Image (cartoon, rainbow, N blue to C red):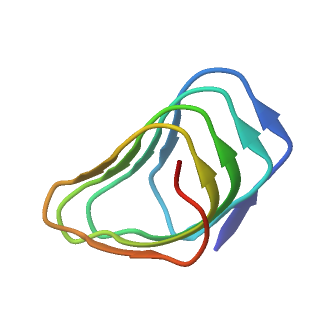
Amino acid sequence: MKRRGGITDGDLRVDRDGDVDGIVGGSVTVAAGCRAAVSGIVSGDLIVEQGAVVEMSGILSGRIVNRRGDVRVTEMVG
């Protein structure tokens, strides 16, 4: 499991199981078959590919684009 934190300018692709926290200045894409916990602030979209499992907590400014994954939202999505 990998942890990504801090500030990310632009988009972020999660291609292995892990946690994403902090601030992402673009969209977050969780690759097919990966598990991720996304918290903090995401300025763009949350894109969940087929078979991915994502728990979103925090603030999402964009949309949730679910491409046949599993998404659970536990906080504010705005």
Residue 65 shown left or right of residue 10 in the figure: left
Residue 10 in the image, given as x and y percentages of width and height: 60, 21
Q: How many marks?
A: 0
Residue 7 in the image, given as x and y percentages of width and height: 82, 35
Residue 29 in the image, given as x and y percentages of width and height: 41, 45
Q: Is residue 14 above or below residue 24?
A: below
The residue shown at (53%, 48%) is: 78
Residue situated furthest right in the rendering: 6
Q: Quadrant of residue 68?
A: bottom left
The residue shown at (86%, 43%) is: 6
Residue 52 shown left or right of residue 75 in the figure: left
The residue shown at (76%, 40%) is: 23
Q: Is residue 53 above or below residue 20?
A: below
Q: Quadrant of residue 39?
A: bottom right
Residue 47 in the image, given as x and y percentages of width and height: 34, 47
Residue 31 shown left or right of residue 56 in the figure: left
Q: Is residue 33 above or below residue 48?
A: below
Q: Is residue 32 above or below residue 71?
A: above
The residue shown at (26%, 60%) is: 32
* Screen quadrant of the N terminus: bottom right
Q: Nearer the viewer, residue 4 or 65?
A: 65
Residue situated furthest top in the rendering: 10
Q: Nearer the viewer, residue 74 or 31?
A: 74
